[in-house]
Amino acid sequence: MASYPYTHFEGTAAWHAMLRAFEELSLNQDLHELTPREYLVGFLLHRLDEAGIDLTDDHRRPATNTRRPTS
């Protein structure tokens, strides 16, 4: 993809989580994308960043959907 303004978010945990969410919405036919997904994800992360939400991987919480090993 050509250069666009959100490349600095690529590779972060937030980027990957948002991509997975868009994939799920698309597969469930809950969302019909008219704009390339990278722009949608980047724009939303940009807005979160502007709102002061820390998107760095250094402050991640554990995922809530992880499975714990059974004994």
Image: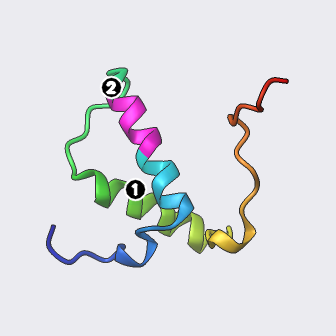
Mark 2 lies on residue: 27
**How packed is label 2: few (under 14 Cα within 10 Å), some, or many (20 or more)?**
few
Mark 1 lies on residue: 41
Residue 56 in sight here: yes
Measured along the vertical axis of the image, is residue 13 above or below residue 27? below
- Element under disc 2: helix
Residue 52 in sight here: no
Measured along the vertical axis of the image, is residue 48 above or below residue 28? below
Q: Residue at x 63, y 73 (%)?
A: 56
Check disc 1 and give the amino acid type: Val
Q: Where is residue 35? Give x, y as percent.
A: 22, 50
Q: Indicate left or right for 42 with 2 as reference.
A: right
Q: Indicate left or right for 10 with 69 as reference.
A: left
Q: Where is residue 55? Give x, y as percent.
A: 61, 68
Q: Main secondary structure of the magenta part?
A: helix
Q: Where is residue 70? Give x, y as percent.
A: 80, 24
Q: Quadrant of the C terminus?
A: top right
Check disc 2 and give the amino acid type: Leu
Furthest-right residue in this view: 71
Q: Which residues are magenta?
A: 20-26
Q: Residue at x 38, y 24 (%)?
A: 30
Q: Quadrant of residue 32?
A: top left
Q: Quadrant of residue 68?
A: top right
